[in-house]
Amino acid sequence: MSAAPSLAPAPAPAVGDEVIAARKLGLVFGTNDGSVHALKDVDLTIRRGEFVSFIGPSGCGKTTLLRVVADLEQPTAGSITVNGMTPDEARRARAYGYVFQAAALYPWRSIARNVALPLEIMGVPKAERARRIAANLDLVGLAGFETKFPWQLSGGMQQRASIARALSFDPDLLLMDEPFGALDEIVRDHLNAELLKLWAKTRKTVVFVTHSIPEAVFLSTRIVVMSPRPGRITEIIDCDLGAERPLEIRETPRFLEIAHRVREGLRAGHGYE
């Protein structure tokens, strides 16, 4: 088992520290069967250095909201800024890294060359590319696997390579769409602990989509609970679990209390009594 990640307390939110600011955000998809209201009246501020998880039932708009931040979907109502820019401007400025549900590595490229891809597109000189590749593979525990190909790595190792690729150009913001959802529980626990250590080292702002209540509580400084479609934010829950978060913290009364609150928030969003 990994050693407990040592986390300094997250910096207190300050005016002007907004990384993501959404106001009355809405998105309606037009389909052959009529309009689909994916998001409605989303108000959310995420500040520098936070680890914020989106949780909610399937189809509630978690991934859609993340894709709006990334300029992969365009809202039809309201406004959103990323680092004070429009999502389009933030994408062009390479203000964020994106980790998908699947690792999405090119099978014909080595792990090093997969991590290098964004740097090649950006025109980063070869020597600097090599330095960044080595640094980021070391950061995710893949030093020594540079010449391997994705099919030679386990699913968890492929996801770590995907994270290294997202970090290769040193974005301030990391967007993660259920990156560990397809992994078994043992591997997922390990990568959760590793992700916390990585966050402690880099202090990136992380926005994380998950279906798992324990995962959300273990990782987050705040949890955004969303309702079924149309996706709305029904509650935002603070995770004040302190600086040290070994996996065993999941058995503590405070962890269980927060998890219960998240579960009740999800039930309330469904309209259950």
Image: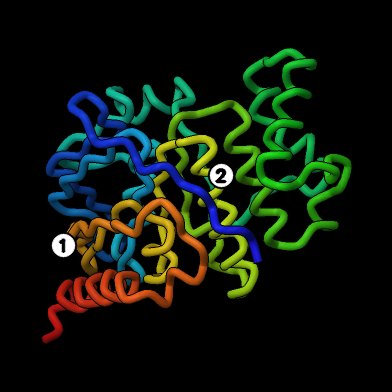
Q: Residues within 10 Å of mark 1 (few under 14, many from 20)?
A: some
As helix, strand or loop, the secondary structure at mark 2 comes to: helix
Mark yes or no: residue 35 visible.
no
Count of numbered circles on the image: 2
User: Which amino acid lies under the numbered mark 1 shown in the image of this protein?
Assistant: Thr
For this view, does 148 lie left or right of residue 237?
A: right
Look at 39% across and 63% down and name the residue there: 216
The numbered mark, 2 or 1, whose residue comes first in the sequence reads: 2
Q: For the C terminus, which image quadrant?
A: bottom left
Q: Which residue is the site of mark 2? A: 198
Q: Nearer the viewer, mark 2 or mark 1?
A: 2
Specify how the rendered protein is coloured.
rainbow
Q: Nearer the viewer, residue 219 or 75?
A: 219
Q: Residue at x 54, y 52 (%)?
A: 5
Side of 6 relative to 134 (left or right): left
Lateral position of residue 164 relative to residue 74, left or right? right
Most foreground residue, 221 or 78: 221
Quarter holding residue 198: top right
- Give the labeled residue for mark 1: 234
Name which residue lies at 58% across and 38% down: 166
Amino acid, disc 2 = Leu
Q: Which residue appears farthest toward the right when viewing the image? A: 147
Residue 132 lies, in percent from the top left, at: 70, 26
**Residue, x 16% and y 41% (percent of image)?**
77
Residue 193 locus on image (x, y percent): 56, 58
